[in-house]
Amino acid sequence: RGLANVFSQGMDDLGDKLRARGYNATVHEYGAWPSSAAEILANQRASGGRHQAVVMGHSLGANAVTELVNAVGQSGGSLALAVAFDPTVQQQVSGGARRYINLYQSNNGWGTTVSAAPGFRGRVENVDLRGRGTITHFNIDKDPGLHAQVISWVGQ
């Protein structure tokens, strides 16, 4: 979730949708990313590397996704997928995710792109939703169409 753990309620709804499909989805505030990264790494080590993880976040939570992905990569772990909903600062992905999808709006005053750092071996995709006039920084995490797309990516 984003600022003050009260925004980004769409992450709760997306988590519910993923749990209904059998995924072990949990929702945390953006400042909890170090403990989430540690949990992912512990699960991967305990499973001999078979544990697959997906992370996503909105706003400050999207910024935290990049921090988490990079930390997991620096510790030798990996994530199957990372999805950012309108991060608020430009960041580089240096490792940890095989696929990083950034859903943002270049015209809303908040969202920005994410880039791949030199040597990054995964795939970074920036999807600019500027043409979707009904989406704003404050509801991008709640959009049912984006939820459906993200759920399909998780299934891949």
Image (cartoon, grey):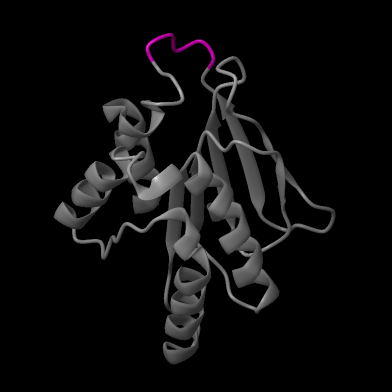
- Is residue 1 in sight in this rendering? no
In the image, taking residue 41 as reference, residue 93 lies left or right, namely right
Task: Count numbered badges in the picture.
Answer: 0
Residue placed most toward the observer, 122 or 105:
105
| Residue located 55% across and 42% down the image | 101
Extreme right residue here? Answer: 118
In the image, taking residue 34 as reference, residue 23 lies left or right, namely left
- Is residue 127 in sight in this rendering? yes
Q: Is residue 97 above or below residue 130?
A: below
Q: Position of residue 93 (x, y in %)?
A: 69, 53
Q: Quadrant of residue 47?
A: bottom left
Q: Quadrant of residue 73?
A: bottom right
- Magenta segment, prevailing SS (helix, strand or loop): loop
Q: Position of residue 113 (x, y in %)?
A: 66, 33
| Residue located 43% across and 19% down the image | 136
Q: Quadrant of residue 106?
A: top right
Q: Position of residue 84 (x, y in %)?
A: 51, 42
Extreme front residue here? Answer: 4
| Residue located 18% across and 54% down the image | 21
Magenta stretch: includes residue 131: yes
In the image, taking residue 65 as reference, residue 122 lies left or right, namely right
Q: Which residues are magenta?
A: 130-134
Q: Position of residue 53 (x, y in %)?
A: 43, 66
| Residue located 40% across and 47% down the image | 4
Residue placed most toward the observer, 93 or 153:
93
Residue placed most toward the observer, 84 or 20:
84
Magenta stretch: includes residue 83: no
Q: Is residue 37 above or below residue 115?
A: below
